[in-house]
Image: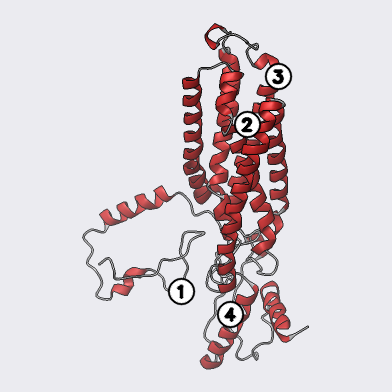
Amino acid sequence: MDSSTVANEAAKDSLRTPLLPDLLSHSQRPEYSIPSSKAADQAEYSPSNHVGKLNLKNTKSSAASNGSESHLVAQLMRVYTGDGSVDSKGRPSVRAETGGWRTCPFILGTECCERLAFYGINANLVNYLTRVLLQGNAAAAKQVAIWCGTGYMTPLLGAFIADAYLGRYRTITTFSVVYLVGLISLTVSASVPSLNPPPCLEEVYACQQASPAQLSFFYLSLYLIALGMGGIKSCVSSFGADQFDDEDRSERKKKTHFFNWFYLSINAGSLIATSILVYIQDNASWGLGYGIPAMFMAIAISTFILGTPIYRYQKPGGSPFTRITQVFVAAARKRSIKLPSDERALYGFDDKESVIQGTRMIQHTKQFK
């Protein structure tokens, strides 16, 4: 075991035992406090060194203390991520055990299967509406446009829920289940004869139209899929980015490569859907053509959940509307207060991260004065 490995292990042990390792003599060792494991979920972690609430105080020799503190921080930065992420148990993310490329197959697979399912439905939906549900071309095209527009609007809802309340991981898993339920319902709708009007060989206007109950079941399935898209499209790419530490140069470079693979997974899913699935729908059966995306989506959810122990998580920061309201209220209440002579007093706390969980403090600038 080389010296760097020994140092990393010592730094990790310092957070898990009641005493720091003997990097300093007893007279030079700083006092500190670390949240217990039971309070890990409520603990605030510093994004600069990610050692939790590590409170370093004055020691007998300030020079030795500063040197030892820098040495400890350098070791911890090699062991833990510096972006404030936590693991599945709410503890600081260990760089060697979480995130990185090891998580990408689960995330990219989810995106590929979601795109396969979406384009597998969207590419041939007009034909399904005209051939099976016996709608006119104009009505079918209108319904497809409304459904697509809804699917691309729901990510606004999914992003808000993820950033404010659930976090990206739970939003993805929850909305993926909704997506899967919609796919299964759509498969049932296309497979069960009683859920469709009888086949018609005459002109559309002379055929028996789909009943309100049949259309209701079909559109319920379709819009469950649109709702599921909201939590997946808004979060999968950003959750993948969370697996790479922005504070580390090598991981920051890997993040750019991740998005290349992410874009490839989107195109792979759409290629399979618009070629193989469309052929199956036209030449085999609609039930099979919709059942295959449902099967792949179920596999994607299962594999995504398998990666839970190795993901890195950013905590949700609460509703942004609450913070916006607080700004206006505070501005109104303090409108008569005189500004301090030292403008740095307006910057808040220099030794703390942002009070909003999951975010970092913005650097101050005089550009907009």
Q: Are marks 2 and 4 in contact (CB under 8 Å)?
A: no
Instruction: Report whether residue 320 is seen.
Output: yes
Mark closest to the chain's N terminus, 1 or 4? 4
Mark closest to the chain's N terminus, 2 or 3? 2
The answer for how far apart the CA atoms under marks 2 and 4 are is: 49 Å
Q: Helix, strand, or loop for circle 2?
A: helix
Mark nearer the viewer, 2 or 4: 2
Return the residue at label 1.
Answer: 351
Q: Helix, strand, or loop for circle 1?
A: loop
Residue at the farthest right position: 1
Quadrant (top left, top right, bottom left, bottom right) of the C terminus: bottom left
Return the residue at label 3.
Answer: 192
Answer above or below: position of 60 versus 73. Answer: below
- Color style of the picture: secondary structure
> Which residue does the image show at 55% across and 76% down from the upper left?
55
- Camera-side residue: 94 or 23? 94
Return the residue at label 4.
Answer: 73
Mark closest to the chain's N terminus, 4 or 3? 4
Return the residue at label 2.
Answer: 182
Residue at the farthest top position: 206
